[in-house]
Amino acid sequence: MNIKYIFKHARVLGFAALMLTGQSCSDLLDEKVISGIGNDYMNTPKGLEDAVNAAYSSLRYYYGTQQGLTMTEYGTDIYATGADGSYKGFHFYDTQLNPTVDYLGNTWDELYKGVNTCNAIIARAPSNSLADATKKLRIAEAKFLRAHYYFLLFQQWGGVDLRLTETLVPTKATKRATEAEMYNAIIKDLTEAIADLPNSSSQYGRAIKPAAEMSLAKVYLAKAYSSQKATDDFSKAAALCNNVVNNYGFKLLDDFASVFDENNQKNSEIVFAVQYTSDLLTNLTNNTGNVNGGNNLHLLFGMQYDVQAGMQRDILNGRPFKRLRPTTYCTDVVFGERVNDSRYKKTFKDTWYSNKPGSYNTAFDDSKAKVTFAAGDTAIFIPGYEMSKEERAKKPYQVLVPSKYSEALFPTLRKFFDTKRPDMTYESGSRDFFVYRLADAYLMLAEAQLGAGNVKAATDAINMVRRRAAWPGKQSAMEVSTVDFNLIVEERARELAGEQTRWMDLKRWGILVERVQKYNPQAAPNVKAIHLVRPIPQTQIDRSEKGVFAQNPGY
């Protein structure tokens, strides 16, 4: 049984909510649009269940979308801009990144919508006539989600308006919480959620204990580098990650590429996923800017293959929006070792087969003047190294070498390809987005153990991920004898590239500015310490009492 959440415009309890209705023991829940819901509906058993399902919906604004990707992968050490797209201020850290940017305001509003839905659930559930065990579980889910939304807000903007009770009417009374207040509230919610959540759920997609433990471990890791750090933050994070990797039956898949097999999304490595679907109604536009609906990350990492010799756009190779391309540091250093490590080959698409036979003049490959293809012939190959002109001339296809990379032509991330779209222009993808997976838990465990001074345990944890990433027969060669902080930084980039973690990682470690200055030439001239947080949306400042809600410094 899945929990599927669908965008619907409903007015519940004085705030906009996204409602899901229908309970079923089939794989997908029965869905229907509901609007005009009264304030008392949530006080019924069915209403409370619908509200809990609705509380998950804000995850779908942030994860697997261009706006969420913009705020998590743009402007880092491993990704730079492609040829197309807006919101490049998040890459360049220039004046385009300002309080009026709609992605900032929309994300802020959507996360707070999720918070207020959770507040209403937590407040109203005790008096609901649902069975006590069910109420206890739903409150735990709401606390997990509220903590998750507040942690995203906190990491992106710093201290925010910490509302832990239901807001029923508009108010201009706001204030910014301190770091200590934010950490205390988030940790309290997750600790209480862990106590009451089950180890697993028959409804795939619901919050479970290991997901809450991973979430709390991430909070402790962030706290460990912050002004609020405590001596036991790393050890607490390590204990939580140890639980996840040892006590719930999760297992790393044997092949790194198989983690992202679109036909095997509910695999043994996934701890918590945000669900998407091919259902058109579910993928309707919501009212906060997710224009296309669905998981649309398949659009955003693609190079412009479709105008090259022997090629045209198709479903298999995707619709290339050319928003992000890997930095030289990413391809040459992070993914530089390829003899033993399979992740370069399995992360980036390097071969395109002709789907438009014929003879053509070459474009980027100056080793030959013309190429001729039959259907299925190799049309483009990216070797990943500077193949000589003489060697390229022997190939019957165009070879794209690093010196010819551009904002339009570059190695393409393949993790999010979606071949189940109904046509080649369709933007709403149906893949689930993996928020927490086991490899991340091992990497967090390594980081936590290293921070706690347990180098041997850190090494053992990181080697679990590295052995899985090896080519067959190369597992021993992939093992490291010891681990240091730089290996943690680069291993997370290798394993999690494009998975909406990088900006938050660099910010957590306090190395965003130095890494961007060193490895991202586009952003190096502008990035500075003020960019460790985003500008507070002007809409939030305007909605607050004058002078109360201060803008972050420098914006």
Image (spheres, rainbow, N blue to C red):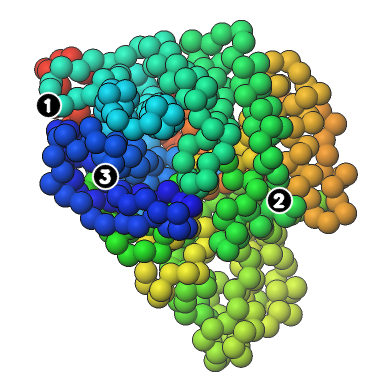
Pointer 3: residues within 10 angstroms few (<14), some, or many (20+)? Answer: many
Q: Is residue 441 left or right of residue 173?
A: right
Label 3, secondary structure: give it: loop
> Depth-wise, is mark 3 or mark 2 nearer the camera?
3
Location of residue 272 with respect to 285 vertically, above or below: above
N-term-proximal mark, 3 vs 1: 3
Q: In this view of the protein, which residue sits in the foreground, 478 or 186?
A: 186
Mark 3 in CB contact with mark 1 (< 8 angstroms): no
- Residue 26 appears at what percent x and percent y? 45, 58
N-term-proximal mark, 2 vs 1: 1
- Which amino acid type corresponds to the residue marked 2 in the rendered image? Leu
Q: CA distance from mark 3 to mark 2?
A: 35 Å
Regarding residue 25, the answer to whether it shows in the image is: yes
In the figure, residue 128 lies in which quadrant? top left
- At horizontal 78% and vertical 50% (from top left) the residue drawn is 470
Pointer 2: residues within 10 angstroms few (<14), some, or many (20+)? Answer: some
Q: CA distance from mark 3 to mark 1?
A: 18 Å
Residue at mark 2: 253
Residue at mark 1: 169
- Which amino acid type corresponds to the residue marked 1 in the rendered image? Val
- Residue 243 appears at what percent x and percent y? 66, 27
- Residue 334 appears at what percent x and percent y? 66, 44
Pointer 1: residues within 10 angstroms few (<14), some, or many (20+)? Answer: few
Residue at mark 3: 18
Q: In this view of the protein, which residue sits in the foreground, 187 or 513?
A: 187
Regarding residue 79, the answer to whether it shows in the image is: no
- At horizontal 35% and vertical 57% (from top left) the residue drawn is 30
Location of residue 33 with respect to 219 vertically, above or below: below
